[in-house]
Image: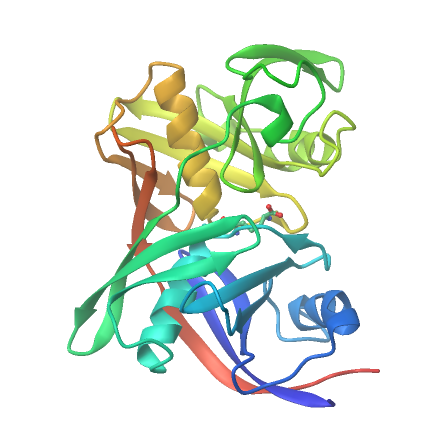
Amino acid sequence: MNSFQFTKMHGLGNNYIYVNLFEEHLQEDKLPEIARQVSNIYTGIGSDGLILICPSDKAAVKMRIFNNDGSEGKNCGNGLRCVAKYAVEHKLVTDTTFKIETLSGLVEARVHLENDKVKLITVDMGEPRLVKSEIPMLGDQTEKTISEKMEFNGETFEVTTVSMGNPHIIFYVDDIEQAPVTTLGPIVEKDKRFPEGVNVEFVQVVSERELHFRVWERGSGVTQACGTGACAAVVSSVLNNHTIKGESTTVHLAGGDLQINWTQEGTVLMTGPAEVICTGTYFIRH
Ligand SMILES: N[C@H](CCC[C@H](N)C(=O)O)C(=O)O
């Protein structure tokens, strides 16, 4: 395979190169290299990574996500909204509510149509995982990490960790504009206490229904938005008594807003937009 068709899409500026594997074929062992190539803004297309829309025997479609460093992630909230939009508009599915398979399990997407175009998507992201063994992180594997003291780069912070199928650590700050995203982010991302790495979120509590949010993503660095991260931030904020379980919280990310609700039933609902940027042909460099 020397070239493939792609669609570049974004969710609040968190943009990926999407490849429809119902129609294209990519060599499995080349996927990390292809992710790095297409993500490069100088010699590729430019993106936060690569997302594959695959056939599934468990759901309507399967999503695989690769960060811009070529590492494979296990979930991607902004990616799920874009995959849902793509699947409906390319008639890979016939319903407006359907399941999507990810490496961390099945989620359910519901699209909101306007003149046959998908504008908003709600994804039930399932239940958060809270004990250390599920993050994963070192320490007492049966315990949760809620406002626990951890030292990074010689400074002690109170942190909370949440998995939405992928690992997140949340730091609370007084002023989101001063958050140490590019200084502390890369240090924490690779900390040895997180054997699979970790996505690093900074959150400023505005009210019990509103958060400011910035992110340093595992494998991609600073992105405009992180859907799983926004879900983790709301779960963490409920656990720390900043926001209310069962109520929708507006999360202000750099690229725009998401509505997140950690429901009384226990799953996390994420609602937000998804947009197509462009389509084209990518020529693989060997
Ligand atoms: N960097 C993440 C994957 C992308 C998640 C993010 N873009 C989202 O929207 O959830 C990880 O390695 O776990």
**Which quarter of the rendering shows the C terminus?**
bottom right
Instruction: Between residue 220 and residue 4, name the one nearer to us.
Output: 4
Total count of labels: 0
Q: Position of residue 19 (x, y in %)?
A: 55, 77
Q: Residue furthest left?
A: 115
Placement of 239 over or under 115, stated as above or below: above
Q: Nearer the viewer, residue 86 or 44?
A: 86
Q: Nearer the viewer, residue 130 or 19?
A: 130
- Residue 273 vs 184, above or below: the answer is below
Q: Nearer the viewer, residue 94 or 275?
A: 94
Vertical placement of 2 versus 185: above or below? below
Identify the residue shown where x is 46% and y is 48%.
225
What colouring does the structure picture have? rainbow
Is residue 211 toward the left or the right of residue 22 in the image? Answer: left
Looking at the rendering, which quadrant does residue 200 occupy? top right
The part of the image, by quadrant, that contains residue 252 is top left
Q: On the picture, is 29 further left or further right than 11?
A: right
Q: Position of residue 249 (x, y in %)?
A: 27, 34
Q: Is residue 95 above or below residue 123?
A: below
The residue at the point 53 percent across, 50 percent down is 75
Quarter of the figure that contains the N terminus: bottom right
User: Viewed as shown, does residue 146 lie left or right of 211?
Assistant: right
Residue at x 25% of width, y 71% of height: 95
Q: Would you say 242 lies left or right of 147 here?
A: left
Residue 224 seen anywhere in this rendered image of the structure: no
Residue 57 seen in render: yes
Q: Residue furthest right?
A: 286
**Residue located 39% across and 74% down the image:** 86
